[in-house]
Amino acid sequence: MQKIDIVARAHWPELAAFIHRHNRRSDGRARCLHAEHGDTADAQASEMLAIPDGEACFVAARAGTGGEWSGMAGCELDPALGRAWLRGPLTRDADDAALQVALIHALEAALPRAVRRFDAFPQVSETALRASYRAAGYRDHMQHHVFCLERPQAPPPWPEAVAAQASPAAAELAARLHEQLFPDTYLTRTSMLESLDDEHRLFAAEVGGTVAGYVYVQDKPLEDEGYIDFIGVSAQARGRGLGRALLDAAVHWAMVERGRPRVSLTARQDRTPALGLYEAAGFREVAAGAHMIKVRTA
Ligand SMILES: CC(C)(COP(=O)(O)OP(=O)(O)OC[C@H]1O[C@@H](n2cnc3c(N)ncnc32)[C@H](O)[C@@H]1OP(=O)(O)O)[C@@H](O)C(=O)NCCC(=O)NCCS
């Protein structure tokens, strides 16, 4: 069995190059969607090194002492939430199931015990990788579609229904709506509000003096794209164009104000209205991810 060790931060740039090389398939798709960060190894390294201490962990296997890496697995983690989002496992031989399972187990063992839930996101068509996750105790959850909009000739103008700047009171109401619509998500009401800065924006649409919809979007300079994390309209205000207005606001901000050439987002396969909204706005599916979950028992 190959020796698997935690990779020190000093070696992450080298590891980023390994990830960059082995995550890309010949058809251009990524094997692991959580491991996809930018178009170059440098962008991958910058993304990894920007993660605060204690919020990421990577393990790798070497074939023989001092030999080349033969595989890696890693994750970003949130000890307060007790969750980890796995990257990989990526192996030099993409069909090395035994090593992939060993890497997953080694990574889990390297994480604090407070981490109880593990989420993985391989490409749906990566049958070997998904089989390795199942062998390591992960169950299939929901499939997701990854959508992308390339900058059209004329990006959408700023929509009238959306305020260019949400007031603190509107932001608070928008975050409450977010909490109602996505009660189990990783981004809580308070963490959403605390995250707001030049690169993380929350836009709200008000109807009759209250917030009826919101969109939360981030600018990702390393990946040269905007990313829409959340969009939601209150149940009673749906079907009247607010969702489209919020989507247009996010696209406008990312493409016109931040100058990004594309905007991406991910949607669960059962969110039919959202899928219809993205397609109607010109977004195209670029990947399909299989969300797989494992919960650590005491
Ligand atoms: C997705 C959501 C934001 C859409 O908001 P909305 O205000 O109802 O959307 P709009 O009225 O602007 O509709 C815009 C387009 O979306 C599509 N759409 C909206 N509802 C749809 C539905 N039920 N079925 C299919 N397509 C739908 C249509 O193409 C529509 O254009 P059209 O009215 O010209 O046909 C809303 O349904 C919602 O908040 N859902 C719960 C949260 C959620 O799923 N968020 C997305 C997570 S990925």
Image (cartoon, grey):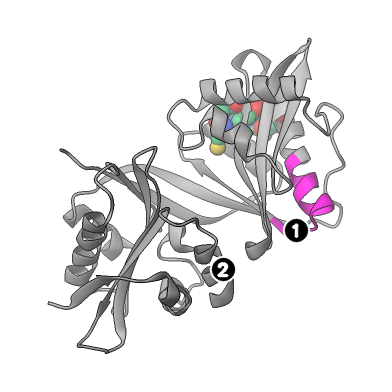
Q: Where is residue 138 drawn, in percent x and y?
A: 24, 48
Name the mark on residue 46.
2
Q: Is residue 227 left or right of residue 297?
A: right
Looking at the rendered structure, the kind of residue marked 1 is Arg
Q: Residue lying farthest top?
A: 208
Residue 192 painted magenta: no
Instruction: Examine the residues drawn in magenta and state their main secondary structure.
Output: helix
| SS category of the residue bearing label 2 | helix
Q: Is residue 211 above or below residue 226?
A: above
Residue beneath the point at 46% across and 40% down: 269
* Residue 44: percent from left, percent from top: 53, 69
Give the magenta range. 250-262
User: Between 137 and 176, which is closer to the camera in this rendering?
Assistant: 176
x, y percent for residue 115: 30, 44
Q: Label 2 CB, ligand 1: below 8 Å? A: no
Q: Is residue 138 left or right of residue 230?
A: left
**Is any part of residue 240 visible from this angle?**
no
**Magenta stretch encompasses residue 260:** yes
Where residue 57 sits, quadrant-wise, is bottom left
Residue 214 spot, x, y in % from top left:
68, 29
Q: Quadrant of the C terminus?
A: top left
Please tell me the numbered disc located at residue 260. Answer: 1
Residue located 78% across and 11% down the image? 209
In this rendering, which labeled residue sits more in front, label 2 or label 1? 2
Q: Distance of mark 2 from mark 1, alpha carbons? A: 18 Å
Taking the image as shown, residue 224 lies to the left or right of residue 115, namely right
CB atoms of marks 2 and 1 within 8 Å: no
Q: Earlier in the sequence, mark 2 or mark 1?
A: 2
Check residue 217 in the rendering and tell me which mark sits there, or answer none: none
